[in-house]
Amino acid sequence: MYTIFEEYRLIDTLESYFDKKLTSLLDMLYKNDTDIYYSGDFDPEGLQIAQRLFKRYPDRFHFWRYDVEDYIKALSDKTLFESRLKMIDKIDTVQLKPLTDKMRLLRKTGYQELIVDDIIKDVLAII
């Protein structure tokens, strides 16, 4: 079994849409029993990507640095206004509920760049 840790730049390329080439790559890796790890921005678009990946690869998918504790570390000063909060309401993955609840409460986005040191430490710990 192989495990892949996508660098944040690779995940950043997803933005709010799935890049077909990246999806094809992830599909091939998944078919070869590769675990898929996701770490992204703490905003509606990042949540949508996390949910899509989780639903596409349910048995090999892992949230990586994508929980309430990391959200708090990644908090920005950007407010989530009502239209963007409504996007969060569409997230129905149970594993993301604590995170979406906290995001609704604080009404702020969080950015992966603010926890990149933790991500790098994680990668270095497994090499």
Image (tube, rainbow, N blue to C red):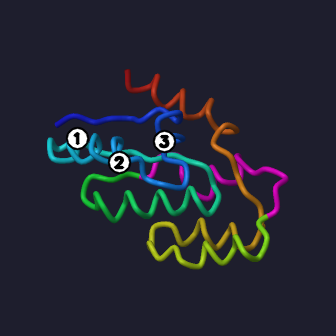
Q: In the picture, which quadrant includes the C terminus?
A: top left
Q: Given the image, on which type of amino acid does mark 3 rest?
A: Ile
Mark 3 crowdedness (10 Å alpha carbons): few <14, some 14-19, many ≥20: some
Start-end of magenta stretch:
63-79
Q: Given the image, on which type of amino acid does mark 2 rest?
A: Lys
Q: Residue 86: horizontal and vertical position, in percent?
A: 66, 78
Mark closer to the chain start, 1 or 3: 3
- Whole-angstrom CA distance, mark 1 to mark 2, is 14 Å
| Element under disc 2 | helix
Whether residue 108 is in magenta: the answer is no
Q: Residue 5: horizontal and vertical position, in percent?
A: 39, 35
Q: Given the image, on which type of amino acid does mark 1 rest?
A: Leu
Of residues 88 and 119, the one nearer the viewer is: 88
- Whole-angstrom CA distance, mark 2 to mark 3, is 13 Å
Label of residue 11 in the image: 3
Mark 2 crowdedness (10 Å alpha carbons): few <14, some 14-19, many ≥20: few
Report the side of 115 relative to 76 (left or right).
left
